[in-house]
Image (tube, helix red, strand yellow):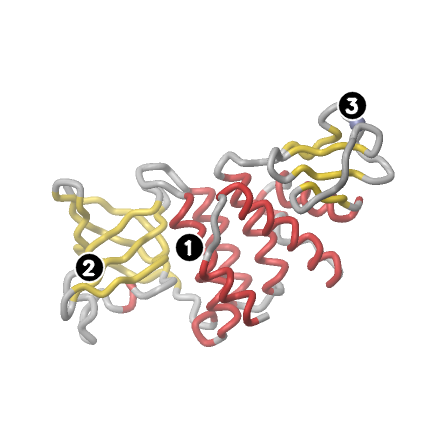
């Protein structure tokens, strides 16, 4: 069976002398692994389109439960990302997240759109790495069905109070009247501005998602929350995240 779809290469793994496997986030089939025979030869017609972070149109065969690349055509290559160590590290972290949380055989148009747009802004330096990291982390969690309840306090529905508390593990808010106990590592006090940014990332329509502005300090404090949210819900560490953080 011949299948055609578009997708971004998230990882390359060498196989033998000339072949490689690529993990690809596709629009129709989630993250899948495709064997690209001969693609590591310099003169291969599939060399560019199967490189890390290439966004390509891919045509491949399915034999039993494996996919074999037939032909491909590059759509976009995000060339600047591979020339900048911070950007490359951040994009690698995004890739590791996607490979971890997007199963195969699931339509993933909105996740692919989120990744492509984030990569576009990263490639063109149109937004800072910190801004894009928070946005991608938090919106991705929402897209895969792990959106926290951010509308108001989970007990009295208060939309805002002097101070709100965000229970990261259970994805819920408390107002200062309903919150009992002490803030801890995963239950953090959250300012109005931080909450506003999280609501914006989670709920705004896609076309306006990248258009908000934040101060540097707000970008930093929101980043701490979105990263905790990812790590708490996946309950694991990501080597690519540790590497990115060692650079910035
Ligand atoms: Zn309350």
Q: Residue at x 74, y 56 (%)?
A: 218
- Neighbor class of circle 1 (other Cα within 10 Å; few <14, some 14-19, many 20+) is some
Q: Relative to residue 92, is residue 60 drawn left or right?
A: left
Front of the two marks 2 and 3: 3
Circle 2 — which element? Answer: strand
- Neighbor class of circle 2 (other Cα within 10 Å; few <14, some 14-19, many 20+) is many
Circle 3 — which element? Answer: loop
- Give the mark, 1 or 3, whose residue is nearer the N terminus: 1
Pointer 2 residue: 36
Q: Residue furthest right?
A: 162
| Residue 126 lies in quadrant | bottom right
- Give the mark, 2 or 1, whose residue is nearer the N terminus: 2
Q: Looking at the picture, does residue 102 appear above or below residue 131?
A: above
Quadrant containing ligand 1? top right
Q: Residue furthest front?
A: 181
- Neighbor class of circle 3 (other Cα within 10 Å; few <14, some 14-19, many 20+) is few
Q: Quadrant of the C terminus?
A: bottom right
Tally of numbered discs: 3
Pointer 3 residue: 156
| Residue 96: image tag | 1
- Classify mark 3 as within 8 Å of ligand 1 or not, answering yes or no: yes
């Amino acid at each position: 069976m011949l299948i055609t779809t578009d997708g971004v290469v998230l990882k390359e793994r060498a196989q033998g002398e000339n072949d490689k496997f690529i993990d690809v986030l596709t629009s129709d089939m989630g993250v899948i692994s495709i064997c690209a025979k001969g693609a590591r030869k310099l003169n291969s017609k599939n060399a560019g389109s199967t490189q890390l972070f290439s966004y390509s149109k891919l045509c491949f065969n399915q034999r039993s439960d494996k996919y074999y690349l037939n032909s491909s055509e590059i759509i976009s290559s995000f060339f600047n990302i591979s020339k900048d160590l911070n950007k490359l590290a951040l994009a690698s972290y995004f890739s590791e997240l996607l490979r971890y949380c997007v199963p195969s055989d699931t339509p993933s148009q909105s996740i692919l759109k989120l990744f492509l747009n984030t990569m576009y802004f990263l490639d063109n330096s149109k937004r800072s790495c910190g801004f894009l990291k928070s946005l991608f982390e938090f919106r991705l969690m929402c897209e895969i069905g792990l959106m926290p309840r951010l509308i108001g306090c989970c007990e009295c529905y208060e939309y805002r109070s002097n101070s709100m508390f965000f229970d990261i593990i259970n994805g819920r808010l408390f107002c200062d009247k309903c919150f009992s106990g002490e803030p801890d590592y995963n239950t953090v006090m959250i300012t109005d501005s931080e909450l506003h940014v999280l609501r914006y990332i989670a709920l705004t329509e896609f076309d306006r998602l990248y258009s908000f502005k934040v101060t540097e300090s707000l970008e930093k404090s929101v980043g701490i929350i979105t990263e905790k949210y990812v790590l708490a819900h996946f309950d694991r560490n990501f080597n690519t995240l540790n590497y990115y953080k060692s650079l910035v």
